[in-house]
């Protein structure tokens, strides 16, 4: 699992460790992961890598497979978010970072395992996207684009692996109480604590659902966003709150 050092990733790690799973936890920061592993039951691996570096991810995958074998579940959870505005030249770098992490990092996370899972005839590849990928939100062009791209990529991968025994699970959470959302200066309806979100997402993974939104209330929001006419969407969301610009979190 990528993005394991905090937030939803940490909550998912605690959930699965409590279920007796052996975990390979990937993040850029080693210290929080070592502290996390020390607090978990069972035997786990700390794998330091940036998901923007496919070579580092392949190395981390090899270490895990050598120690524990081909995993049953791979969760591409790593993500960054920051407010962006195309009119600012410096925000081009933020777009690059967000898209590399949230979209290309997902591809690089799955790639080392697809062939082995297909050969074995089982496994789950889980991509954590977002309701923000349903429509482009103002001031969040990079994040919305990355999550919309993730949803489209996951759908493509799911069809490619049809009848292989390998399930591709797309999860689109709403708001989750994490450091990433702590800086949002606007209301966040139906926000979930990370441990509650982790439990719900784990149930989705266990069922092998093709696509799920959590919480269910945000599922209705997602359906509404899909059918909202462009003229109405533009009028309503032009006034929406926006995440601060700055360094991606």
Image (spheres, rainbow, N blue to C red):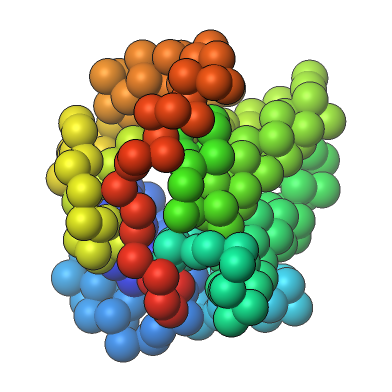
- Looking at the image, residue 128 lies above or below residue 86: above
- Looking at the image, residue 195 lies above or below residue 90: above
Foreground residue among 105 and 86 = 86
Residue 21: % across, % down = 37, 50
Q: Quadrant of the C terminus?
A: bottom left
Is residue 56 rendered to the left or right of residue 114? Answer: left
Outermost residue, bottom direction? 31
Foreground residue among 14 and 129 = 129
Q: Residue at x 47, y 47 (%)?
A: 138
Residue 17: % across, % down = 29, 54
Whether residue 185 is visible to the viewer of this picture, yes or no, is yes
- How many numbered circles are shown? 0
Q: Residue at x 50, y 15 (%)?
A: 228
Is residue 170 rendered to the left or right of residue 96? Answer: left
Whether residue 203 is visible to the viewer of this picture, yes or no, is no
Q: Residue at x 28, y 27 (%)?
A: 215
- Looking at the image, residue 128 lies above or below residue 214: below
Residue 101: % across, % down = 59, 65
Using the rendered view, name the quadrant where residue 185 is placed: bottom left
Q: Residue at x 61, y 40 (%)?
A: 148
Residue 158: % across, % down = 72, 29
Is residue 176 rendered to the left or right of residue 212? Answer: left
Using the rendered view, name the quadrant where residue 189 is placed: top left
């Amino acid at each position: 699992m990528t993005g394991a050092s905090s937030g939803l990733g940490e909550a998912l790690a605690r959930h699965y460790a409590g279920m007796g799973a052996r975990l390979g936890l990937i993040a850029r920061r080693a210290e929080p992961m070592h502290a996390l592993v020390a607090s978990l039951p069972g035997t786990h691996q700390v794998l330091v890598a940036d998901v923007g570096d496919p070579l580092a991810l392949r190395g981390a995958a090899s270490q895990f497979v050598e120690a524990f074998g081909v995993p049953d579940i791979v969760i591409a959870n790593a993500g960054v978010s920051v407010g962006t505005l195309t009119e600012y030249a410096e925000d081009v770098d933020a777009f690059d970072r967000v898209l590399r992490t949230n979209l290309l990092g997902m591809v690089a996370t799955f790639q080392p395992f697809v062939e082995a899972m297909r050969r074995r005839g089982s496994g789950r590849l889980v991509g954590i996207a977002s309701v923000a990928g349903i429509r482009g939100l103002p001031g969040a062009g990079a994040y919305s684009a990355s999550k919309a791209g993730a949803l489209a990529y996951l759908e493509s991968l799911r069809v490619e692996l049809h009848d292989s025994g390998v399930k591709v699970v797309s999860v689109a959470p709403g708001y989750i109480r994490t450091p990433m959302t702590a800086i949002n200066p606007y209301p966040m309806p139906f926000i979930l604590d990370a441990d509650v979100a982790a439990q719900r997402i784990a149930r989705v993974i266990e069922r092998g659902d093709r696509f799920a939104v959590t919480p269910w209330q945000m599922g209705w929001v997602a359906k509404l966003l899909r059918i909202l006419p462009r003229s109405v969407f533009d009028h309503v969301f032009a006034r929406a709150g926006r995440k601060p610009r700055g360094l991606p979190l």
